[in-house]
Image (cartoon, coloured by chain):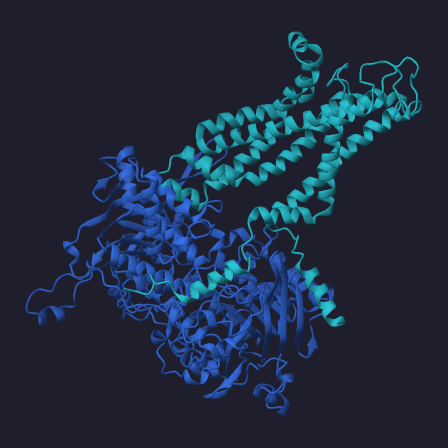
Chain colours: A blue, B cyan
Amino acid sequence: MSSEIAAGRVEQPQSPAERLHVAGLHAPSDAILSVRDLNVRFNTENGIVHAVRGVDFDLMPGKTLGIVGESGSGKSVTSLAIMGLLPTTAEVTGSVRLKGKELLGLSDKAMCEYRGNELAMVFQDPLSSLTPVYTVGTQIIEALTIHNPGMSKQTKEARAVELLAMVGIPSPKERLRAFPHEFSGGMRQRVMIAIAIANNPRVLIADEPTTALDVTIQAQVLEVLHTAQEETGAAVVMITHDLGVVAGMADDIMVMYAGRPVETGAVDDIYYNPRMPYTMGLLGAVPRVDVAEKSSLVPIEGMPPNLIHPPTGCSFAPRCPLASDACLEGEPALAPVPDGPLHLAACIKSGSLGGDVDVLDVFAAPPVPVSRFDAIPREERATVLQLKDVRKHFPLTRGALLKKRIGTVKAVDGLTFDIREGECFSIVGESGSGKTTTLLEIMEFHKDQDGEVVIGGISNKKAADARAKSAMRRELQMVFQDPTGALDPRFTVYEVLAEPLQNAGMEKPAIRKRIMELMKLVGLQPDHVNRFPNQFSGGQRQRIGIARALAVNPKLVVLDEPVSALDVSVQAGVINLLDKLRAELGLSYLLVAHDLSVVRHISNRVAVMYLGKIVEIGEVDRVFDNPRHPYTRALLSAIPVPDPQLERTRERIILQGDLPSPLDAPKGCNFATRCPVFAALPKTKQEKCLTLEPPLLPVTPSPAAQTLAADPLPALDQRFACFFPDGEIDEDMLVVHEAADHHAP
Amino acid sequence: MTNLNAVDPAAVAQDAHLEGADVVIGKNTIIFRRFMRNKTAVAGLAIFLALTVFSFVGGYFTQWDKETIDPFNIGMPPSAEHYLGTSQAGIDLYAMTVEGTRISILIGLIVGLVSVLVAAVYGCTMAYFGGKVDKVMLFILEALIMMPALLVVAVATSGGGEGLKRDLPSWLLLIIVLLVFSWMGTARLIRSLSMSLMQRDFVKASQYMGVPARRIVWRHLVPNIGSLLVLDITRGVTGAILAEVAFSFIGIGIKVPDVSLGVLIGGATSQVQTFPWMFWVPLTVMFLLTGSLAMMNDGLRDAFDPSSSSSGSAKKRALKTRVKGNAS
């Protein structure tokens, strides 16, 4: 490890890291980017928010530093401060040195010399960081022109083509003249990376570069970032809330909390031997996609402190299960932990928190709730929702005056599944695969739908009048993705919860009583009912959303990405709550999520959708441990795991390209255009994939197992739609990062 | 069975924190604070209120009224007897200005308020029903936008409608005509805004709970476009005052013996050289009126805009204390 994070605040020159500096053991002059005591203050209605409080780090050339933390921990503000992109109202103090030159205090004009040249940034949202009115070529060439005024037009164009090819955009020469809207989200993020590396930056800051993207695309973009770093030799600062994303990429990790680094060290130290309870909590809060064992997640209760008031003790103490009186006396400084001088933690108890401490014990994770339905075989439970061959096709028309039908978008194409009592059924897939449309079709519930929807015994074909609909609404409720958008900002919590009850015709006293019950049920304080949604944190708002859905005692709750808008620590609390409610109230869930780790943690059964069709369906452990369809395999392999060693060595299937437009969906198997197995098949077999549509067939136990068993084996609960599940995977799509490659100097 | 139901200490601590530290500031308080911080806007509000008070009580400070002719003072400049001088017909300009300001403010307020109300109802209805209703209502709206307002005002106030003119004072007629032509832009804005609100998750949530659409519009849509309505009222008032002045100026709005700022300005343009006070006094009042509203509107927009750069005053206070601390 040649790149280390030097820490210790300037006020405490006695810290060992500083002494190392003095001794010249790792002189800051080696560092390409060196940040010392960075402080950022913002001025708000409530007072001064001290958003970043003393960040120190040294970034060595060619190395990657991961900055991890919840939202509001000051990660993005730190990066913007380095780039000099904060609004002028922000007060920035400290020192940021790029190759020894001070950047703080430079005028905007002087900063422009560095921005896009030696310092470059990739932003979170690729949809809004490209100008829609210029071609991507113009925008890449713009970045080149500014810093290389002498470059000829031909050279610039050639360089732009080279850059686009480097980030993996097919036929780069033609795509140069394309506009941003002609690119998908992942492609746009590649263009952003191309622009960022155009001038061979020494430091590349990536602020949540893949958060807005699908897992398969995330895998592609991370791969591109990896290549970009190799090509340019730039040092990378990777800012993320996802511990999985940085596990495979970073050399060092800095965990931030309440505007301060609370633990820093080499990636292995942080992941395998965390010494700060916050880091331990963060790691325990993430569900693992590769682990079948069912245990509750670690919720970190409470929310980050308000940075208007300087914390008197350890900033994490109010949420820390191990906090004692000593923790409240002064904020602990970053200090080396016993296992090495380069691993620092800001905790007075770091010495006693070794790798052998179980995070579940520390944070008192709730026991795994057991539902009364778990003991009953699935076949004997009542069906709460049944879909029979549901389709939703949108006509695609062209022409202004005379509308001509040029095709059909098959958003949902023949979906059949059922959900039993007390069961959690999940639908996973990339965006555009038809998950949300499926939910909307269920929620719409009217007679003219193509296909039958049966909710609690009420079919949309037989009874779709107002009364049947209102009976159906009591069986089925929904929890939305964005808890902020789903609550009317002008309603108090009481009004929010009262709405469905009033609608059900309940009396006032009964409503009051029920609301108090609901607040307790979802773990909120009943006396908070008079508050407005903006007075709650994201996790609490989602709890209010869940309480509203449960108000009328439904049997089935539809969860549309219920935790994707929440921080990991909060997410764990909400997932545990959902798990508990399912067990206690005997609820069934229909969950749509793109996060497969969450799906694995909470569901019993899962369906993988691709272009409106189910490609694989079955019991969650079977599908995740033994995926048969190549798409499921690719999806699963695209998910980063918060385990650095595994992440560095495992094989990954990187799918080429994006989800095809439903218009040019192939005739046979939908997935053929991107299929890693298809690419490796001989021509004769490919023909079959292209012409015939694979049916959804159950997995049969292997002949060997059948002969061994005395009785005929029961059919397994897993079905998939692929002709060649055991086919070889095309080598171009397989990526393995060698461990050696990672540690190479 | 789990610790989720238990009241955990962290949450309690955090609540105490929340309550003790007034972290949560009501939205109205924030808007009020932001507005009050904008000195120009507060000055605008003060000027507007002063003018309104003046237009109602100003008449008591002089014995003249807008109809009495003073045969001894015809076309006289300001003097002790006639504060602002007299017209060439011998009518006291001060009395006329008070009357004209009142009529102008009245027209402005009525047209501003009522047109926004009409626009809100019309716009929300369009968004709520959608489909064919929306199409028809949109067509009517577009047709009204394309109608030559100037011509209609001219016809209504001078040419046709003799019966109407007998029964109604000319300023009331002008209000009605202005109303007919002033609400369409806002209605279209409100329609699009409500349509995007209809797409919001909380509206969808109510729909999926089976709440009737009428109740959704009333409880979810209207309160959420409130800030836009307030802004539009001040803008509408300014617009109406200016329209009145313009119409009266070219002689198709308010008719003598009714008097308004526009009538006064229009009547005096030909004699700017000989009777300058007749022209400059009403013009100044009109500038004060529309100017103050514009200043207020600017402040209101800043106050309502969540992304406004109007930042807290804490910095200055903190800086001061810091300076004090250093000095001591």
Is B91 on the left-hand or right-hand side of B139? right
Query: Where is residue A388 shown, x and y percent of the image?
Result: 24, 45
Q: Nearer the viewer, residue A17 or A684?
A: A17
Near-viewer residue (A391 or A67): A67
Q: Nearer the viewer, residue A364 or B193?
A: A364
**Left or right: B47 as drawn, with respect to A439:** right
Q: Quadrant of the N terminus of chain B?
A: bottom left
- Which of the 4 image quarters holds residue A229? bottom right
The answer to whether residue A578 is left or right of residue A127 is left
Q: Is residue B64 above or below residue A206?
A: above
**Viewer can see residue A409:** no
| Number of numbered discs overlaid on the protein picture | 0
Q: In which quadrant will I find the C terminus of chain B?
A: bottom right
- Seen in the picture, residue A266 relative to B216 is either above or below; the reply is below
Q: Residue furthest bottom?
A: A23
Q: Quadrant of residue B170?
A: top right
From this view, report whether residue A149 is shown above or below residue B232: below
Location of residue A442 in the rendering, given as x and y in whole percent from the top left corner: 31, 44
User: Can you give x and y, in whole percent of width and height, for residue B27 in the image?
Assistant: 56, 48
User: Furthest-left residue in view?
Assistant: A710
Asked whether residue A87 is in view, the answer is yes
User: What residue is at 32 percent from the left and 39 percent from the top?
Assistant: A507
Where on the picture, by quarter, is residue A273?
A: bottom left
Q: Residue A91: image x %, image y %?
A: 67, 65
